[in-house]
């Protein structure tokens, strides 16, 4: 009896030892889980897009390494176009040396998840209670029916018209209070021999900034949501696709065509890219441009520190006053990370810093040309204290005043994006009316619908 008991204890000990060794290679270690950061050496492999995004991530990971010397970040900087063209094949290959990858929100995320290339991070949201700590607009960019497969590192508002305050003052002009007043303002500038607007039609998406702003003036908030979420609606139909050629969509395209026909863009709008658009405005060749907050501000201050500029929110319609806001840039996580709880804990902790740690959020404001995704810093005075830039603080104040609606071309599938940009450029060349441009979007939506039903 005693021998049997000893044998049982020995066998039990062996089984326990085998479990520990298999669960934790290298010996008995505490189970890896969220909130518990390893003290063992660990390397996190990241793909980051170039530009200010790189400056920010280099700074943020350096701060994290100071706090956790055992953590190394191996950062590969990729051109945005390279990531855009190769993300599906790269992530589908289940790369071993890639733990976090820069990406954009929208339909791309759903495809990556449907392909089994990226993992959900709902446990991270639940553990850190990010839903309570992030600004509410973030939620508008999660993927219906998928969950959280994307972490938004920041947002940009893009419903503003920047103007050269010196030009306005010298010509006795003030920001408009209606769409009609906006056209009158453009007419006065043209009559004074000043190009009213700079627009980078060659790249397509700068015209998208204008169109987005105008649907937020010509449509209701629910209709804006229907348009931008149409492709992800499991019950979409030819009837619901009518939103693409609705009155508001037509008016937004026609707004661009009318500006161009009156030569308020100057000549050759589609010959200018985004950078040339910025240069035109920064050099005083045009009185106004549609631009980002705060990217436009950071970029302009870097090139022309004393540029006399301000912005105004395009006059709202009678019942819809929200500012169009784009949650665009963030990161996704290859499916292989699902099997590495140690790295998951590190990455989740790093991203949590961007939501709850003032030091990291300050770096986002200073290094990334962005507004934080966090509720921690929203006071305009605090923004001025950090950045020294009242215009960025004004952007935060306007969001609090008007509220936001999320609208972005990233929700449109690639086939429709091509049609959309062509419609924008055709309206800017006045080779399509607003009705024709909107009709082309509707036709593309029907093709998407027919493809999905095959």
Image: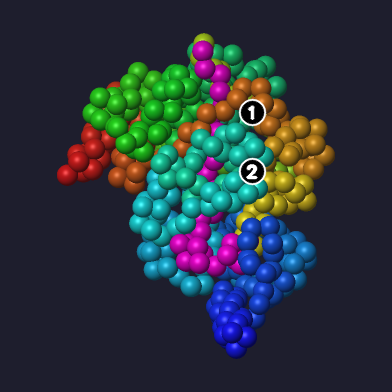
Colouring rule applied to residues: rainbow
Q: Residue at x 57, y 28 (%)?
A: 404
Q: Looking at this view, is 68 or 223 the one in front?
A: 68
**How far is disc 1 from disc 2 in space, using C-alphas?**
23 Å
Instruction: Quadrant for residue 25, please give it.
Output: bottom right
429, above or below 89, in the image: above
Which residue is at the far bottom? 3
Query: How far across and down, in percent of the image, does residue 210 sit?
Result: 48, 31
In the picture, the disc for residue 399 is 1
Check residue 296 for magenta coloring: no
Query: How far across and down, in percent of the image, does residue 319 sit?
Result: 51, 13
Q: Looking at this view, is 129 or 183 the one in front?
A: 129
Q: Is residue 239 left or right of residue 420?
A: left
Check residue 326 for magenta coloring: yes
Instruction: Quadrant for residue 112, please give it.
Output: bottom left
Quadrant where the N terminus is found in the figure: bottom right
Query: How far across and down, in percent of the image, does residue 334 sit?
Result: 47, 62
Q: Residue at x 62, y 22 (%)?
A: 402
The answer to whether residue 51 of the structure is visible from this angle is yes
The residue pinned by badge 2 equals: 129
Which region of the structure is painted magenta? 319-345
Q: Is disc 1 placed on a helix, strand or loop?
A: helix
280, above or below 314, in the image: below
Please state the total of marks drawn on the protein image.
2
137, above or below 66, in the image: above
Classify 10 Å Cα crowding around label 2: few (below 14), some (14-19), many (20 and above).
few
In the picture, the disc for residue 298 is none
Q: Is disc 2 placed on a helix, strand or loop?
A: loop
Query: How far across and down, in percent of the image, does residue 9 sit?
Result: 61, 81
Q: Residue at x 65, y 17 (%)?
A: 174
Q: Is residue 149 left or right of residue 126?
A: left
């Amino acid at each position: 009896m005693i021998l049997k008991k000893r044998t049982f204890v020995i066998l039990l000990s062996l089984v326990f030892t085998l479990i520990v060794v298999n669960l934790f290679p290298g010996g008995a270690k505490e189970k890896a889980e969220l909130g518990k950061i390893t003290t063992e050496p660990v390397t996190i492999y990241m793909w980051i897009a170039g530009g200010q995004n790189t400056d920010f991530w280099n700074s943020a990971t350096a701060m994290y390494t100071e706090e956790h010397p055992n953590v190394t970040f191996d950062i590969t900087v990729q051109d945005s176009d390279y990531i855009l063209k190769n993300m599906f094949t790269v992530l589908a290959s289940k790369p071993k040396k890639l733990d976090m990858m820069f990406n954009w929100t929208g339909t791309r995320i759903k495809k990556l998840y449907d392909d089994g290339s990226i993992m959900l991070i709902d446990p991270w949201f639940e553990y850190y209670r990010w839903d309570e700590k992030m600004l509410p607009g973030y939620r508008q960019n999660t993927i219906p029916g998928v969950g959280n497969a994307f972490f938004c590192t920041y947002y940009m508002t893009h419903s503003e018209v920047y103007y050269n305050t010196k030009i306005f003052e010298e010509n006795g002009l003030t920001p408009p209070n209606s769409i009609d007043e906006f056209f009158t303002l453009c007419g006065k500038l043209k009559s004074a021999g000043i190009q009213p607007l700079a627009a980078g039609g060659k790249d397509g998406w700068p015209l998208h900034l204008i169109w987005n702003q105008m649907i937020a003036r010509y449509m209701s908030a629910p209709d804006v949501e229907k348009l931008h979420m149409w492709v992800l609606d499991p019950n979409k139909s030819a009837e619901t696709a009518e939103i693409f050629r609705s009155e508001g969509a037509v008016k937004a395209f026609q707004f661009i065509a009318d500006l161009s026909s009156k030569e308020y863009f100057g000549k050759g709008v589609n010959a200018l890219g985004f950078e040339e658009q910025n240069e035109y405005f920064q050099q005083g060749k045009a009185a106004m441009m549609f631009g980002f907050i705060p990217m436009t501000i950071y970029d302009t201050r870097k090139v022309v520190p004393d540029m006399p500029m301000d912005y105004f929110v395009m006059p709202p319609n009678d019942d819809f006053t929200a500012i169009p806001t784009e949650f665009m840039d963030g990161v996704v996580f290859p499916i292989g990370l699902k099997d590495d709880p140690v790295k998951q804990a590190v990455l989740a902790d790093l991203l949590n810093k961007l939501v709850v740690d003032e030091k990291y959020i300050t770096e986002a404001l200073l290094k990334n040309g962005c507004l934080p995704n966090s509720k921690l810093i929203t006071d305009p005075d605090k923004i001025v204290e950090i950045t020294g830039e009242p215009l960025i603080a004004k952007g935060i104040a306007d969001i609090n005043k008007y509220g936001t609606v999320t609208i972005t071309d990233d929700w449109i599938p690639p086939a429709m994006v091509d049609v959309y940009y062509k419609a924008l450029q055709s309206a800017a060349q006045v080779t399509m009316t607003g009705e024709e441009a909107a009709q082309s979007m509707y036709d593309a939506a029907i093709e998407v619908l027919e493809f999905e039903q095959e």
